[in-house]
Amino acid sequence: MKKVKSKDCSKKINSAVFISGRGTNFKSLLSFSKKKLSPIRIKLLITDNKKAKGIFFAKKNNVKFKSFSYKTRQRSELKIFKELKKNKIKFIMLAGFMKILSKNFINKFDGKIVNIHPSLLPKYKGLNAHKKVLKNKDKFSGCTVHFVSKKLDSGKIIMQKKVRVLNNDNIKKLEKRILKIENKIYPLAIKKIFN
């Protein structure tokens, strides 16, 4: 994996966040990006859902946002790529983006796309991680920040955090607790990449 290096701390790296929903990780990354020692500057929000709640945080923080219908992946990715190029984006953070990026797209940003996943990878890749954790009566779950590779949820792990599964947990309760941890570790993982 190629590391993205910021040669000068005062020169932040132009970054984009991709979301599909409520955008709590986007919100957390936004506040982190505003810190003096943060290596990133969030210039762009990309979403496949024009009603994504996360757009509210973009508007509130004067971050440019673009919505793409994803009727065809190839066409949408071409448009997204043009938008990224126009805004000189060098780094991408997926934060609850519910579309799978093509190998071609990943190649263009090799080693410069990261994702957060709500399980302790390599366990429970893909959808319904919380459901699988509860079904298998796991004692622990958690979340993982990893580089995006051509295989789903299989890229190099940057950071993980464990969460104990409680006896009275259901999908909603577990998801809520893990999401709080996600919001904390995503910025820490970004910091780790650039240090």
Image (spheres, rainbow, N blue to C red):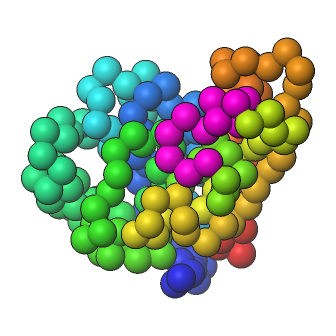
Question: Residue 6, relative to residue 171: is it above or below?
Answer: below
Query: Horizontally, is 31 left or right of 80 in the view?
Result: right
Q: Is residue 12 visible?
A: no
Residue in the foreground of this view, choosing between 57 and 159: 159
What residue is drawn where x is 25% and y is 71%? 104
In magenta segment, residue 128:
yes
Residue 99 location in percent, x, y? 34, 45
What residue is drawn where x is 81% and y is 39%? 138
Snapshot quadrant of residue 48: top left
Residue 51 location in percent, x, y? 31, 21
Query: Horizontally, is 52 left or right of 12 in the view?
Result: left
Query: Horizontally, is 153 left or right of 21 in the view?
Result: right
Residue 53 location in percent, x, y? 43, 22
Residue 160 location in percent, x, y? 76, 56
Q: Which contiguous range is marked in magenta? A: 124-135
Residue in the foreground of this view, choosing between 21 and 125: 125
Q: Is residue 132 visible?
A: yes
